[in-house]
């Protein structure tokens, strides 16, 4: 077992976060097309992106403090993943720009809830003398999942339409949350 590149906790964190990152990347490059499809403009797409980022930025400050206080940060991550999955699921019902804005706020809130808890857990489980390698693994995974998600999202939308990726994005988020929840009692994290 000593030959494994990463400890079990980091493998779990990388795998579950990869699913979330793939889900988010599926819509990224074609987001403006979706906004246009619901009657929005490029400016509306920009405003929606800004609302996501502003929400995530503000809530992250609070969530960071919360993750330092809670004993089981994985439960905070699970909540964030579920919120994001719910936002992704709601995309399929978006029929107005205002509804889109609300969904973006929800997704931003979910990301802000999980991110500091993830960072805390990842940092706690870093192996001594390997922090550069292990954070580098997350950074690399972030780029690889973005590339994969962007390509797969475009292929799925081209073949099956936007609702198909929204369901897939939600499913990936819920799978990630469920996996963490099932591992939580085993104290892997």
Image (cartoon, rainbow, N blue to C red):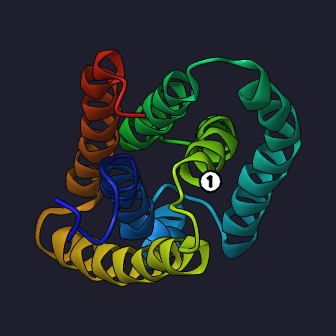
Residue drawn at the location 23% of the way across and 69% of the way down = 157
**Structural crowding at the residue carrying mark 1, measured as other residues with C-alpha within 10 Å and reported as few (<14), some (14–19) or many (≥20):** some
Whether 83 is drawn above or below 123: the answer is above
Residue drawn at the location 23% of the way across and 50% of the way down = 168
Whether 101 is drawn above or below 29: the answer is above
Towards the viewer: 80 or 47 = 80
Instruction: State left or right for residue 160 relative to residue 33.
Output: left
Instruction: State left or right for residue 148 relative to residue 39.
Output: left
Q: Estimate the x, y position of residue 105 in percent, counting from the top left.
A: 69, 39
Q: Inspect this view and state whether residue 97 appears.
A: no
Q: Inspect this view and state whether residue 126 appears.
A: yes
Q: Estimate the x, y position of residue 36 in percent, counting from the top left.
A: 52, 67
Numbered marks: total:
1
Tell me where residue 93 sits by quadrant: top left
Towards the viewer: 177 or 159 = 177
Residue drawn at the location 72% of the way across and 30% of the way down = 67
Tell me where residue 108 sits by quadrant: top right
Q: Where's the N terminus, which quadrant?
A: bottom left
Towards the viewer: 61 or 58 = 61
Q: Residue furthest left?
A: 159
Q: Estimate the x, y position of residue 133 in percent, counting from the top left.
A: 50, 80
Identify the residue position indicated by label 1 in the image: 123
Residue drawn at the location 40% of the way across and 75% of the way down = 141
Whether 79 is drawn above or below 169: the answer is above
């Amino acid at each position: 077992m000593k030959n494994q590149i990463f400890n079990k906790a980091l493998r779990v964190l990388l795998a579950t976060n990869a699913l979330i990152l793939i889900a988010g990347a599926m819509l990224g490059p074609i987001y403006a097309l979706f906004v246009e499809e619901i009657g929005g403009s490029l400016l509306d797409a920009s405003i929606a992106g800004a609302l996501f980022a502003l929400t995530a930025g503000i809530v992250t400050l609070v969530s960071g403090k919360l993750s330092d206080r809670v004993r089981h940060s994985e439960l905070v991550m699970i909540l964030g993943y579920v919120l994001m999955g719910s936002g992704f699921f709601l995309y399929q019902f978006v029929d107005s720009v205002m509804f889109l804005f609300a969904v973006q706020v929800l997704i931003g809130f979910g990301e802000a809830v999980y991110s500091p808890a993830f960072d805390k857990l990842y940092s706690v489980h870093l192996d001594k003398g390997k922090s550069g390698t292990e954070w580098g693994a997350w950074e690399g995974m972030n780029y690889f999942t973005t590339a994969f998600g962007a390509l797969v999202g475009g292929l799925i939308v081209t073949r099956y339409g936007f609702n198909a990726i929204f369901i897939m994005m939600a499913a990936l988020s819920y799978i990630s949350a469920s996996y963490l929840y099932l591992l939580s009692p085993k104290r892997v994290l």
